[in-house]
């Protein structure tokens, strides 16, 4: 099966029909008047739209036939709920509906479980976001979504965050025809970066230049967590001597690094 080129769910994608905006508008009006043939023609004429949308989820390693069918459910919902009296293109309304349906499917099949009440709140928030996106012709804020739902902003934000899918660290985020850039390439770890690694090497080299007694004091003081008095008692010198040796050793380490 070659997704997007030959066949998916038994549909030959090379033969999918493209409808003009005028044809879509006419079919939508006829569908609202109960014409089932027009409804079916409208569905068939927008399968390319569904196909183009599910390509965004190709790297999820989900069965593309399943995603296509779920996307078609979103398309059908968009057709049945589209308001022909609004001055809005059908695709503008249908795209978020299809994406929302696919995302709901992916969330329901996610291995990370979220409570039913939180998930229901999140789904209502997504529906409100889709409705507001059409009304406002832009992405609504969490404040606007919460107000539309009559819920607290904090609860809506928590619900939406709870259903965010985890990102696979080896998921490709960019490909210009050559080597791909993956999520892991964009992650940084300040504790294990090049700078920290070089500092660790420099510290080891600086410690090598200390006397055996200085090395022992630094080790007990900073790696063993002992006080100067405890070190003095253990190695048999005064606390003042420990303090002097420690300061001298640290000064040479800083100078070396």
Image (cartoon, rainbow, N blue to C red):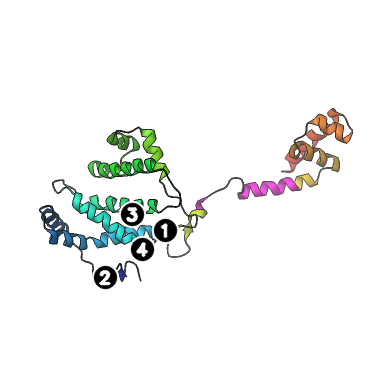
How far is the residue under mark 1 from the one under mark 3? 12 Å
Q: Which numbered disc flags the more N-terminal residue, 2 or 1?
A: 2
Q: Are marks 3 and 4 in contact (CB under 8 Å)?
A: no
Q: Nearer the viewer, residue 73 or 187?
A: 73
Would residue 37 be found to the left or right of residue 54 on screen?
left
The residue identified by callout 3 is 102
Q: Earlier in the sequence, mark 1 or mark 3?
A: 1
Q: Which residue is mark 1?
A: 60
The image position of residue 154, as x and y in percent, is 39, 34
- Quadrant where the N terminus lies? bottom left
Q: From what the image shows, is residue 245 above or below residue 84?
A: above
Would residue 51 be found to the left or right of residue 58 on screen? left
Secondary structure of the residue carrying tag 4 is helix
Q: Which mark is residue 148?
A: none
Report the residue marked by disc 2. 14
- Residue bearing the label numbered 4: 64
Picture quadrant where residue 159 is located: top left
- Mark 1: few/some/many CA within 10 Å (<14, 14-19, 20+): few
Picture residue at 23% right of the left edge, 50% below the top: 93
Q: Nearer the viewer, mark 2 or mark 1?
A: 1
């Amino acid at each position: 099966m070659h997704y997007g080129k030959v066949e998916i769910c038994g549909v030959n994608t090379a033969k999918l029909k493209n409808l003009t905006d005028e044809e879509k508008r006419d079919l939508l009006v006829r569908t609202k008047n109960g014409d089932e043939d027009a409804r079916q023609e409208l569905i068939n004429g927008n399968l390319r739209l569904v196909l183009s949308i599910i390509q965004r989820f190709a790297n999820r390693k989900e069965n593309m036939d399943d995603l296509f069918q779920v996307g078609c459910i979103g398309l059908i919902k968009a057709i049945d709920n589209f308001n022909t009296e609004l001055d809005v293109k059908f695709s503008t309304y249908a795209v978020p509906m299809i994406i929302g349906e696919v995302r709901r499917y992916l969330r329901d099949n996610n291995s990370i479980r979220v409570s039913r009440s939180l998930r229901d709140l999140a789904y209502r928030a997504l529906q409100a976001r889709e409705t507001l996106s059409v009304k406002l012709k832009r992405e609504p804020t969490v404040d606007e979504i919460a107000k539309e739902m009559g819920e607290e902003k904090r609860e809506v934000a928590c619900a939406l965050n709870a259903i965010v899918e985890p990102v696979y660290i080896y998921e490709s985020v960019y490909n210009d025809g050559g080597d791909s850039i993956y999520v892991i390439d964009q992650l940084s770890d300040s504790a294990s970066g090049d700078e920290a690694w070089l500092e660790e090497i420099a510290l080891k080299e600086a410690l090598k230049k200390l006397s055996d007694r200085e090395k022992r004091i630094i080790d007990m003081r900073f790696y063993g967590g002992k006080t100067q008095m405890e070190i003095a008692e253990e190695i048999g010198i005064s606390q003042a001597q420990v303090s002097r040796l420690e300061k001298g050793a640290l000064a040479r380490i800083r100078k070396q690094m």
